[in-house]
Amino acid sequence: MAVKAVGIKKLKAQLSEYVRLARAGETILITDREEVVAQIGPARHRPPLAGSLDEILDQMADEGMLTRAGLPKGDWTWKTEGLGLPAGTAQKILDELREDRV
């Protein structure tokens, strides 16, 4: 099927018509000041992904839906760093603030 191009103003005015064309398999390029900025077309219908998480991610990457990370995660872990204050400091500050309210 042929690819059509339409400006934003005309697309807004005739959106239902362009959705009907997309449903029928047409691809519509959307232009803004003669520059193609987006496209609409028929939805891709495919069966749900199955398998392990890595298999699903690989399949999605093969279909161009995502890009896999270039570096492996390795064995890093998230480590929170405190402010280096003695234990109980936060509680003491809260207690002092609460005393001011009474």
Image (spheres, rainbow, N blue to C red):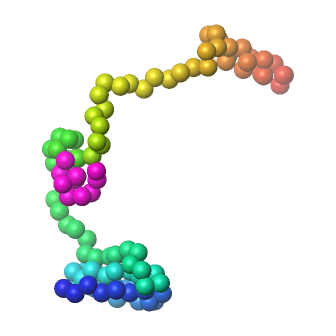
Residue 40: quarter of image: bottom left
Residue 62 magenta-drawn? Answer: yes
75 lies left or right of 2: right
Q: Residue at x 34, y 80 (%)?
A: 29
Instruction: Tell me if I can see residue 8 in this picture.
Output: no
- The quarter of the picture where residue 10 lies is bottom left
- Quarter-wise, where is residue 75 in the image? top left
Q: Quadrant of the N terminus?
A: bottom left
85 vs 27, left or right, is: right
Q: Give the answer, above or below, for where 92 lies relative to 16.
A: above
Disc tally is 0
In the image, which residues are magenta? 58-67
Quadrant (top left/top right/bottom left/bottom right) for the C terminus: top right
**Percent position of residue 18, x then y:** 34, 85
Query: Residue 84: x, y in percent?
Result: 61, 15
On screen, residue 66 versus residue 11, left or right, reads left
Task: Inspect this view and state whether residue 92 appears.
Answer: yes
Q: Is 82 left, or right, of 58 in this rendering?
A: right
Counting from the top left corner in percent of width and height, residue 89 is at 68, 14
| Residue at horizontal 81 percent and vertical 19 percent from the top | 99
